[in-house]
Image: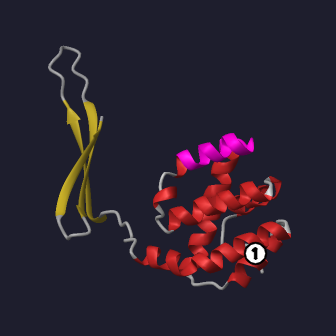
Amino acid sequence: METSLISSSAASILKTASNLDLGTFNELVQIVIGLLTRSPKHLDATSSLSKLSSTSGTSISELTSIHSSLTTLITILSSQNSPPDVLQQLLEDLTLPSSHISSLSSLYTLSLPLIRSSLQNTSTFSDSRLINFGWRLDYRVRSSGAGENEPVFICCFKVVDNEGNEREEEVRLD
């Protein structure tokens, strides 16, 4: 299996998880799964990662990077309802230790129904859509004796939000 489910940068960050001891890795996975299942214990990932950093001796930046990559991977696999063997194969391709792979796979298997339920209750975010665009070029005339005209470029945007409300935005570049 190729690691095309996640970006190459996320894959390379996940490879660094092999540097973590099994206890630290397990706790990091618990934080990720707790966040995805909205467990009250792990809703504040920042403080959980800070505590883990102080107890494990691993830098907060390394833990945060691995946390983000694991969250991305588990979210993608859960949303596709991928079986644990897909996760195992992907982690093997990333050359993670077998102890890390089996630990993450078993926690993923146990948590998959909760994660999927949590993801179903998460609404998607959608930005406003641009429905019309117009522009014009005006000149600002100065009343001074030198009297140079300054160009003013005006862009007019008409957007509609998720509820169907339209609004106009104007941007002046001078």
Note whether residue 33 is visible: yes
Q: Position of residue 50 (x, y in %)?
A: 60, 43
Note whether residue 13 is visible: no
Q: Position of residue 172 (x, y in %)?
A: 26, 41
- Tell me: 80 left or right of 135: right
> Which is the main secondary structure of the residues drawn in magenta?
helix
Q: Position of residue 150 (x, y in %)?
A: 27, 30
Residues packed near mark 1 inside 10 Å, few (<14), some (14 to 19) or many (20 plus): many
92 or 40, which lies in front?
40
Which quarter of the rendering shows the N terminus? bottom right
Query: For residue 108: magenta?
Result: no
Picture quadrant of residue 58? top right
Q: Position of residue 116 (x, y in %)?
A: 50, 79
* Relative vertical location of residue 119 with respect to residue 149 in this rendering, above or below: below
- Tell me: 2 left or right of 138: right
Query: For residue 53: magenta?
Result: yes
At 34% from the left edge and 63% from the top edge, which residue is drawn?
127
Q: Secondary structure at mark 1?
A: helix
At 66% from the left edge and 85% from the top edge, which residue is drawn?
83
Q: Which residue is mark 1?
A: 90
- Tell me: 150 left or right of 104: left
51 or 95, which lies in front?
51
**In this view, which residue lies farthest toward the top?**
145
Picture quadrant of residue 158? bottom left
Range of residues picked out in magenta: 47-60
Name the colour scheme: secondary structure
Which quarter of the rendering shows the C terminus? top left
38 or 129, which lies in front?
38
For badge 1, the amino acid type reads Leu
